[in-house]
Image (cartoon, grey):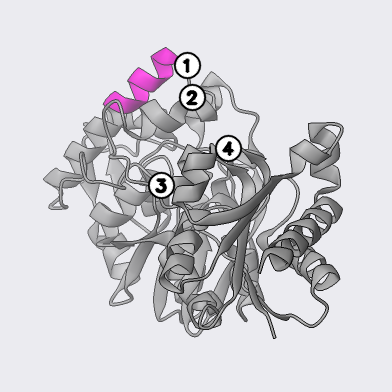
Amino acid sequence: MTRVVIAPDKFKGSLTAVEAADAIALGVRDALPDADIAACPVADGGEGTLEVLENAGGRIVRLSVRGPLDAPVDARYVVLDGTAYVESARACGIEFVTPTRETSLAAHTWGVGELLSDALVHGARRLVLTVGGTASTDGGAGMLAALGAGVWDAFDSPIGLGGGTLSRVAKVELDPARDRLGTVPLAVATDVTNPLLGPDGAAAVFGPQKGAGPEEVAALDAALGRWATALANAGAPDVSNRPGAGAGGGVAAGAIAGLGASVESGFDLIAELTGVDTALIGADLVITGEGSLDEQSLAGKAPAGIAARARLAAAPLMVLAGRIQLDAERLSGLGVVGSSALIDHAPSLDHARSHAAELLRARAGVLVREWAGRR
């Protein structure tokens, strides 16, 4: 019996990883009715992580929190085996704003602190914070303030919220937030390696996606530098150039410096929970994919992680994606024996997005039939 492991990430704007895995499984079943199929949807710690964790048996906790521009948003986190998984974007995601220069300075992470606080109130024994997809570049200052930290200007007045206000920060009191956390360990789940500051930092790389123009990028980078200095003066480690500290608009920096968080690979952490490593034992074929397969996918994203695991299992790999922007040599280097981009089989991008499930099923069926015919 042919064993097929299906481990896609989300198809952003179209399907969750769980929905994508279900669609691919139907295609595999069309081609190989008797196949032993293991569906293990995965995530890298960014948007869509909570759906994957819920599919793995996690319990959803819902609550209303302060959104990135203060209006309340309906947020949630997942509890699995005593660990609370908090996705920053559920509280301050880019989808909650229409990005402008003003919002790039004003957006904050207060709601992220509310999610962490709620998880602590309900007895979480460990916290995992995912940091992708935020609208904010506030270095995690709002998150820390929501947990009780003091963030003051030179006149001992609170500076307010938003990355732009960090230009006035002079002093930070971290003990209340750290006391709130107590002995509960916190990990930041990210595969982003950007530092907090500089040309590869949070403001320069991610700020434009959040509405920042050149002036706002420069202002935010300078403000984050002032924030890093204030944190260091409060006895926290210097996170200015630490790899990964720039993730989530610097919310990772706030968690690392302010709360003593460790940093873990988002993909490895989530993959461990989905059971994909066990499923790969004895696999004859592995299928992965995501919305856009490109150079960024090779830098710690889920498809690259699955490709590495497929190689270790000596199993051939197939890739399905909304679009594929890697050439044949790059795909071959990943161990890919078959690939298909949905956009190549749809009359338009909108059609590909709105009919992603049926296209995934059809293309999976075609690829698997071709592969089975070559065996």
Spatial separation of the CA atoms under disc 1 and disc 3? 26 Å
- 155 to the left or right of 164: left
User: Is 102 rendered above or below residue 318?
Assistant: above
User: Is 256 rendered above or below residue 331?
Assistant: below
Q: Kindly identify which residue carries mark 3.
A: 299
Looking at the image, tell me whether mark 1 or mark 3 is earlier in sequence order: 1
Looking at the image, tell me whether mark 3 or mark 4 is earlier in sequence order: 4
Query: 90 or 205, which is in the foreground?
Result: 205
Q: Kindly identify which residue carries mark 1.
A: 213
Q: In the rendered structure, which segment of residues is drawn in magenta?
A: 213-222
Query: 177 or 237, which is in the foreground?
Result: 237
Looking at the image, tell me whether mark 2 or mark 4 is earlier in sequence order: 4
What's the residue type where badge 2 is placed?
Answer: Pro
- Whether residues under marks 2 and 4 lie with C-beta atoms below 8 angstroms apart, the answer is no
Image coordinates for residue 94, horizontal then vertical, percent: 59, 39
User: Which element carries disc 2, helix, strand or loop?
Assistant: helix
Magenta: main secondary structure equals helix
> Badge 4, how many Cα within 10 Å: few under 14, some, many 20+?
many
Spatial separation of the CA atoms under disc 2 and disc 4? 18 Å
Q: Kindly identify which residue carries mark 4.
A: 69
- 328 to the left or right of 300: right
User: Which element carries disc 1, helix, strand or loop?
Assistant: loop
